[in-house]
Image (cartoon, rainbow, N blue to C red):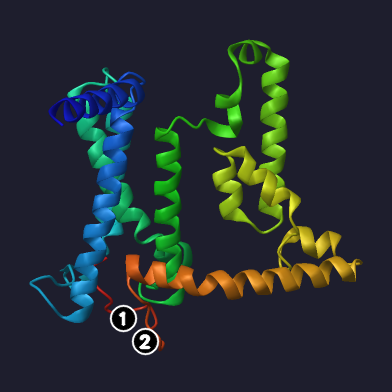
Amino acid sequence: MRMTDETGAGGMGHWFYRNILEPGKLPLLLALASFVLTFVITRIVTRMIRAGRGPFGDVKAGGLHIHHVVPGVVLTVIGGFGSVASSEHTGPGTMVFAVVFGVGAGLVLDEFALILHLDDVYWTEEGRKSVEVVVLTAALLLLALGGFAPLGVNDLSEEERADRRALLLTLAVNFMFVLISLFKGKPRMAIIGTLVPFVAVVGALRLARPTSPWARRLYRHRPRYRARAMLRAFRHDRRWSGPRRKIEDLIGGAPDRLPAAAGPSGQGRDRGTR
């Protein structure tokens, strides 16, 4: 058993060195870890404030509600510029700035919906977009850590990469599938498809969402395609919307079921420190 444990530990250390340290991905790993941890801690704190538990409360200065996107922007700027200005891409300074950037990005994307709507929608249905963006960002970073390159470049051999025409053709074809998926109303598949081209291919080949630009333009005079698209979208939403909502509620907290009263500038909707 001792030999097995030592072998396993050695294998794990070898994998970490070959896949994280040697390619210089440790800053990305630290940024991802701090990003996810910051988001989790922030959601725990805001849910405690919402429930009236614990010592936490809204941050206010002179009667102004300070959303946590504000320090998030500051930390993101410091971490981003610090990483770019660092002379050693794997030095201690870069590691520190990577953590600072991850913390700032976690605070900013936790209020992505607020930035998108320019309103305090943290605990509303619109606020679910923040959770979706955070999960999608974490998934993309995990794929990048796993060695996936944009638009399938990692799938090319050394000879194909040396051939500029083959490289450009591969990039163009994969990018075309990503665009088609996007115009068909499948943004998640399009974004993930930038790193995993097979996902974009599936999204491009399947029917478009009935409200997508593709469907409005190309299905307008094709009632059969339009009906099939609506039926498929209905079945998909009926099957997956419930589980997706439960996962989002588990991660970020359930939104308000009734609209909260708000003043002209969104004041009066204290939904936690943000």
In the rendered view, tell whether residue 83 sits above or below residue 184. Answer: above
Q: Are marks 1 and 2 in contact (CB under 8 Å)?
A: yes
Please state, as top left, top right, bottom left or bottom right, where the N terminus lies in the image: top left
Residue 274: image x %, image y %?
27, 65
> From where the camera sits, is residue 269 visible?
yes
In the rendered view, tell whether residue 246 sits above or below residue 203. Answer: below
Q: Which residue is at a point 41% across and 41% down the rendered structure image?
A: 141
Residue 230, picture quadrant: bottom right
What secondary structure is marked by label 2?
A: loop
Q: Is residue 210 left or right of residue 101?
A: right
Amino acid type, mark 2: Ala
Are there few (<14), some (14-19), or many (20+) residues within 10 Å of tag 2? some
What secondary structure is marked by label 1?
A: loop
Q: Which one is nearer the viewer's eye here, 13 or 52?
A: 13
Residue 207, picture quadrant: bottom right
Residue 124: image x %, image y %?
41, 77
Most extreme residue toward the right is 221
Label 1 and label 2: CA atoms lie apart by: 7 Å
Residue 151, picture quadrant: top right
Q: Which residue is at a point 39% across and 55% down the rendered structure image?
A: 134
> From where the camera sits, is residue 73 visible?
no
Most extreme residue toward the front is 1
Q: Which residue is at a point 37% across and 55% down the rendered structure image?
A: 109
**Residue matched to label 1:** 269
Amino acid type, mark 1: Arg
Q: Is residue 101 left or right of residue 132?
A: left
**Residue matched to label 2:** 260
